[in-house]
Amino acid sequence: MKIKLDENLSGGMLYELPALGHDVESAQTEGIVGVDDVRVANIAREEGRILLTMDVEFGDLRKHPPGQHPGITLFRPYSRGPGAMSRFVLRFMSEAHGLPITGAVVVVDPGRTRIRLPEAHDNAPPAGQT
């Protein structure tokens, strides 16, 4: 899976996620830290990368409707410390194989994962959602 790490995620994941088979780029390595969210979303879209973020703005379906981008996964952990955050993201990404996250807006909370699919899939059964 092609992934873009937003600036608010630990830089260490840039090295840990490829071990799970992902092609990873980050805001830090591309020099786009502090860039407007719309621009970050456009860069991820142009590169065909699913955006991983903690920025709640990306969970706004009016601004980022499912199907209008490669995918956005918003992480909402209890702890935002770098170690806890990395473990939270890595745990989800290691278990995400088979979930319909491409083109979707996904919100990952400690107790559940919500997946908002593109409209073409809105009537599909919620298989894979927890």
Image (tube, helix red, strand yellow):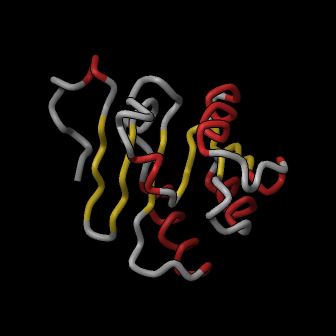
Q: Where does the image place residue 68, in percent across and percent down from the top left? A: 46, 23
Q: Position of residue 27 (x, y in %)?
A: 74, 51
Is residue 125 shown to the viewer in this render? yes
- Residue 86 placement: quadrant: bottom right
94 or 105, nearer to the observer: 105
Residue 111 located left or right of residue 48 = left
- Identified at 51% across, 60% down, the residue is 54
Location of residue 91 with respect to 122 vertically, above or below: below
| The N terminus - image quarter | top right
Q: If the image is split into quadrants, where does the C terminus sit?
A: bottom left
Residue at horizontal 53 percent and vertical 30 percent from the top = 70
Percent x, y for residue 29?
Answer: 83, 53
Q: Is residue 72 above or below residue 89?
A: above
| Residue 35 placement (x, y as % from top left) | 72, 48
Q: Nearer the viewer, residue 67 or 21?
A: 67
| In this rendering, position of residue 80 left or right of residue 21 | left
View extreme (top): residue? 120
Query: What residue lies at 38% left-to-right and 43% top-to-bottom?
Result: 60
Number of marks in the image?
0
Is residue 1 at least partly visible in the picture? Answer: no
Query: Where 86 sits versus 122, above or below?
Result: below
Q: Quadrant of residue 15?
A: bottom right
Q: Is residue 109 above or below residue 59?
A: below
For the point 28% across and 17% down, the residue is 120
